[in-house]
Image (cartoon, grey):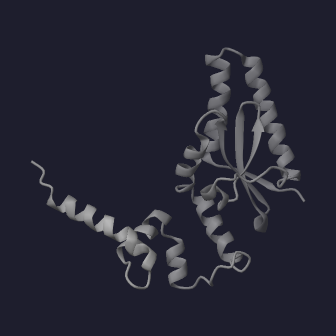
Amino acid sequence: MTYTIKYSTSSKIDIKTSITYINNILQNPFAGNRLRIEVQATVRNLKEYPYKHPIITDLLLTSYKIRFVQIKNYLLFYTVTEEIKTIYIVRFLYSRRNWQRILKSYVQYDEYLSKNTAYYVHENQEEYGLPTLDGWGVFLLSIPIHLFIIILILTADDVFPPFTIIQIPLNSFLNAISKLSFR
């Protein structure tokens, strides 16, 4: 079964910028053209075999089911949405850049990834042993994890004994900040 390919705006810019850099800055149009051809061939191959390449092993990025394939010195990141038979090209980054940091900051703002990841978690909650998401569960899913942790820490009491240990330094930190005076 063949899949539809969708490119994020950032991935289009990444590919174009990389090829332009090779053509103009490195002054090697032959290598730039070769990279363009390889990207096109790889994307064509993804249509037939979308699950051929591994999922990123980073804890946060794994939840988005982002896969990657190496093309020369670059990494092409993509996701597969089985329900709608779509491959979404997320980014195309130079492999020696801090691509994990770039992807982590990017996935928070990508509308397609946010929508489809929430759908994936909701549809496969039994597989992961998650409780049914209704009302508060859907609300909590939409809160970024760092805000959720802060809420848990600030509301810690006898119900969450492990968090009381964290709450003590946080309370003293907040008290110290409140005593500061800025001139």
Image point 76% across, 38% down: which residue?
A: 70
Point 77% across, 18% down: residue: 30
- Residue 128, given in percent of the width and then of the height, sits at 70, 75
User: Where does the N terminus fall, quadrant-wise?
Assistant: bottom right
Where is residue 144? Give x, y as percent: 48, 65
- Give how far across and how far down residue 22 sits, in percent: 67, 22
Image x and y of residue 156, in percent: 38, 78
Q: Is residue 57 above or below residue 152?
A: above
Q: Nearer the viewer, residue 123 or 48?
A: 123
Q: Is residue 179 left or right of residue 125?
A: left
Identify the residue at horizontal 60%, vertical 35% (top origin): 97
Q: Quadrant of residue 170?
A: bottom left
Of residue 67 and residue 115, the one placed in the foreground of this image is: 67
Is residue 52 shown above or below 32? below
Q: Residue furthest top?
A: 27
Q: Residue at x 68, y 70 (%)?
A: 120
109 sits to left or right of 152: right
In terms of depth relative to the viewer, which is nearer, 83 or 77? Answer: 77
The total of numbered circles placed on residues is: 0
